[in-house]
Amino acid sequence: MTSSANAFQSGVSVRSVSKSFGQTRVLSDISLEIGPREFLTLLGPSGCGKSTLLRIIAGLDHADEGSIALGNQTVDGLLPRERDVAMVFQSYALYPYMTVAENIGLPLLMRRTRSWQRLPLIRRLHPVARAATGTIARDVRRAAEALQIETFLDRKPGQLSGGQRQRVALARAMVRNPRVFLMDEPLSNLDAKLRVAARAEIAELHRRSGVACIYVTHDQVEAMTMSDRVAVMMGGEVLQVAPPAEIYDRPAELRVAEFVGSPKINILPGTVRSDGGIDVPGGALAIQSRLPAGTAVSVGMRPEHCDVAPGLGAGGIHGRVRHRENLGSDLFVHVETAGEHRIVARSVPEIAAAVPPDATVTLRPRPDRALLFDRAGRRL
Amino acid sequence: MIARRHLPFAVFRHVVLAVGAVIMLAPFIWLLSLAVKPADEIFTTDIRLLPLKWDAARNFTEAFNKVPLHRYLLNGVVVTAAIFTLQVLVALPAAYALAKLRFGLAKPLFALVLLGLLIPGHVPAIPHYIMLSHAGLLNTYPALVFPSIISVFGIFWIRQFFRTVPDDLIHAARLDGLSEFSIVWRIMLPAAMPALVAFGILSVVFHWNDYFWPLLVVTSPDMAMPALGTVYLRNTEAGTDYGPLMAGTAIITAPLVIAFLFAQRRFIEGMTLTGLKG
């Protein structure tokens, strides 16, 4: 098949794609370049347009403006089946009345035989059709073995567990070596334990196949752990495209910073002082910003970059402990500062006794890790 | 206890149902009773369900001898099967387009389908008759079949069922390389099986029992449909012989009753339109 040869050169280009449903603009001027072997995640809250973008790439939906290219080929006029993409759906979308083998084999059957060869009697008697049936059975078995579902080939999807169905859906996508994999929240119907295993498995399958993959999710853990790059989407726009670590450490916008990370990043309103430090409710940050004095900023601090110490220390931010969460490995201390701002700080469980509820504590954010955002939410 | 509290109501409910059942079944039971009685017992004044002298054999052989009953049954099978097959061939793609495709005319076309539901089948009978007459098709199978090929009820019924099929299934099929027609036959048809069985029973029962249309277009007894055929039993010159008439009627009703008994579960499945579970 030529498609597997192409797979090594072709990525996906999304060029200025816009889409509205009636008055609602779901995608505005999206541009993305996905490398030929890249795993790119579209991360965003529900309703941000990420699934719509995926469907436009697949050809199941049409953009109002803009264009999609797979490899060097513009595919805007092509039907989904002509684009040679494979998709895994959130609901798996397995054909309920076909066996697992028929489900996996259907894309091959449709591609390798002509319609008259699929007629019931001819399929058994015509030499070409029979040969195709043989190679399809072989390829189905190979795909099934890669996903360890070869023992279920004769069952119907209804007789399988969620995890097994998900594997069948993956096998159906993989079996024909598409130019690109599109995955629409494929793990969201699995229980937490299976999801962890499936994450690693999908990432590994992607590496082995060497085919570009666009993965849609609202789960930041999936995005962070599986992707080469993450595109954070919100309100029909791409806010930032970057490797996971960069998304986390250097978010381009306040909205990205707030969406990625758990517990959520702490945001405090601040004002730049004449010496470059920043006043925040309950204290100050000892950093050297080069912003003009008096500039209003939002200060973002990740919980793990805030040290907590009991008592009123010099410098830092003072506040009162409102709540503690001991996860065994970590202790999250919820502190209320002046102006009823809440800050969550990550610490070690050993200090739990020293910071009982209502105790006064001093928070010391690590100055080099503080993130400053301007009024519009852009990082400074 | 819930059961005890509801007992009076349950009794009441069953009494109502039982009365209804008796009223509906009574003519049929009477038919069966007459079908096994000799002629002189049919016109006695006392009501008895079982005959004093069983005459079933004579009545049933008489029914087959007087008219070609087997021919009517064959006509019934051929015509109802042809109608149902063609109805499905039309209704399935139409229902798919109306339920799942987005195109400008989808709404007005569906409105037309609903409008079609409001028009009694007898209204276009004369135009149909004239068309068939011009085509020289009167008194043929096509005359019995053609006017019923497009069933707006079938389109509506299957469309409602298709609405319950998840869109993702169709998207997956498109990506897997299926054309829209392949989607109809390979993906939607198996999904619609319960609805099709229910529709099939309604269609077959209606056309098997249809008296009006065959009466218009059939002129020779050998083209008669079952319901029309029994009339020929009545119109024989020597006056109506009720025993064979009832026997003949019982015979033409039997296939439907048997078919329903076999398909009962699927029929009810289709009626409740539970849809497709992922």
Image (cartoon, rainbow, N blue to C red):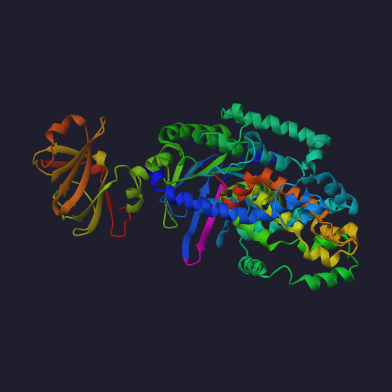
Left or right, A247 with respect to B265, comes to left
Q: Residue at 61% of width from left, 38% of height from top?
A: A172
Quarter of the figure with residue B159: bottom right
On screen, residue A200 above or below A51: above
On screen, residue B89 above or below A20: above
Q: Nearer the viewer, residue A2 or B223?
A: B223
Report if residue A319 lies within the magenta region: no
- Per the picture, the main secondary structure of the magenta-coloured stretch is strand
Q: From the top left corner, tell me how far across and down residue B114 is, in percent.
A: 63, 67
Left or right, A265 with respect to B90, comes to left
Q: From the top left corner, tell me how far across and down residue B10 is, in percent.
A: 46, 49
On screen, residue A112 above or below B9: above
Q: Residue furthest front?
A: B45
Q: Residue at 78% of width from left, 49% of height from top?
A: B37
- Quadrant into which the N terminus of chain A falls: top right
Q: Residue at 89% of width from left, 52% of height from top?
A: B68
Left or right, A262 with respect to A200, comes to left
- Can residue A245 be seen? yes
- Can residue A76 be seen? no
Q: Nearer the viewer, residue A361 or B20?
A: B20
The magenta stretch is A12-23
Quarter of the figure with residue A356: top left
